[in-house]
Image (spheres, rainbow, N blue to C red):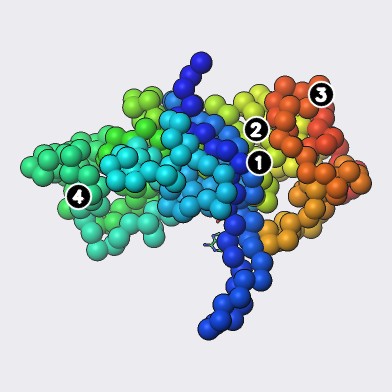
Amino acid sequence: MTENIIEVRDLVKHYPVTRGVVFKKTIGHVKAVDGVSFELKAGETLGVVGESGCGKSTLARVLMNLEKPTAGQVLYKGQDISKLSGGALRRLRRQIQLVMQDPYTSLNPRMTVGDLIGEPFEIHPEVAPKRSRRDKVKELLDLVGLNPEHINRYPHQFSGGQRQRIGIARALALRPEVIVCDEPVSALDVSIQAQVMNLLEKLQAEFGLSYVFIAHDLSVVRHLSDRVAVMYLGKMVEVGTEDEIYERPTHPYTQALLSAVPVPDPTVRESKAIIRLQGDVPSPVSPPSGCRFRTRCWKAQDVCAQEVPLLQIRRGSDHPSACHFAEKREIVATHEAA
Ligand SMILES: Nc1ncnc2c1ncn2[C@@H]1O[C@H](COP(=O)(O)OP(=O)(O)OP(=O)(O)O)[C@@H](O)[C@H]1O
Ligand SMILES: [Mg+2]
């Protein structure tokens, strides 16, 4: 069995909602991540997909130990990361790196590319002694497909795709084991997206990296992911391999997301029911009781308001789904179906 590099257990992250300027009073909580469990194996890519506000970036920040969980644990090689300090915490900071969505805002415009990519060495000098740093940075530039001669240029002198490559070089500098990619291609043109995805794939093969790859859209993560987890309003609703999620989805939300993915083949397109979800995502401050998706679900029954459906393998299926009525066959929406 492959080793679990990260294990997430019943992770909860709530943010207080306050009122008042001087005497802040907590009037509720944003339930950004609300009971999420999964594992990431060495060398694996886990895609995490869901609509805006479902808690993807919050999950990323807690995984990176940038924020403490409200409850639950993140284990890195069996160790609870919130309990690490001193040398162990420094090592963790090296081993897990983040690539962020927006290369325009995540790079300091006043630093040269050389300084930006070399900055991690200032914090972890043991990785590269001062005299070898410039060469290391040039190596990294080459590795991500940028010209090492451009080491003295500034971020604004690069295109969006190139800036994302700078972000990736920076994340790679300390030779991490895990990279959390938080929508790394969402801000890029479609043609550039594929190039950056290919680069991430190449680097994974070369360095045996594990990825948590966050995206809005199921089509983005399909090619790269070994497994995909679908999130809705702070919870994971379905987890599975490519075939399980894309060919045999059982959760109505996954089915709805998939039906929105453009299908190039016209015969498939015609036979595919389009499921249009009603209404908006409810507020994470007061999510619906029971199943959070029930207010937009065409299969919802009384039990869905009363019982929280656990993420578990359902009868007749082969992978976990958090739906009381998980079904293998393609569901045609009873309302607004085209
Ligand atoms: N620091 C914070 N304080 C209060 N609420 C927060 C904070 N960070 C995030 N939230 C809230 O938590 C919820 C989840 O936010 P998060 O950024 O994790 O979503 P996301 O899935 O990454 O969305 P997007 O796709 O837009 O990036 C949202 O309702 C958001 O407003
Ligand atoms: Mg986000």
State the residue at coordinates (23%, 59%): 111
The residue where tag 4 is placed is 122
Query: Looking at the image, is mark 2 or mark 4 earlier in the sequence?
Result: 4
Marks 4 and 3, how far apart at CA: 54 Å
Residue 21 spot, x, y in % from top left: 54, 82
Query: Circle 2: is it few (<14), some (14-19), or many (20+) Cα within 10 Å?
Result: many
Q: CA distance from mark 1 to mark 2?
A: 7 Å
Residue behind mark 3: 315
Residue 147, image x, y percentages = 22, 42
Which callout, 2 or 3, points at the residue further toward the start of the chain? 2
At 24% from the left and 63% from the top, the residue drawn is: 110
Query: Is disc 1 in contact with disc 4, using a CB cutoff of under 8 Å?
Result: no
Residue 14 or residue 61, whichever sits in front: 14
Q: Residue at x 43, y 35 (%)?
A: 79
Q: Which residue is mark 2?
A: 239
Q: Is residue 284 above or below residue 190?
A: below
Circle 1 is placed at which residue position? Answer: 236
Q: Which of the image's four quarters has the C terminus? A: top right
Q: 135 or 259, which is in the foreground? A: 135
As measured in the structure, the alpha-carbon distance from the residue carrying label 2 to the one carrying label 3 is: 15 Å
Looking at marks 1 and 4 on the same chain, the residue that comes earlier in the sequence is marked by 4
- Which residue type carries mark 3? Arg
Answer yes or no: is residue 274 visible.
yes
Given contact means CB atoms under 8 Å apart, are the residues at marks 1 and 2 in contact?
yes
For disc 4, the neighbor class at 10 Å (few under 14, some 14 to 19, many from 20) is some
Contact between labelled residues 3 and 4, with CB atoms less than 8 Å apart: no
Image quarter for ligand 1: bottom right
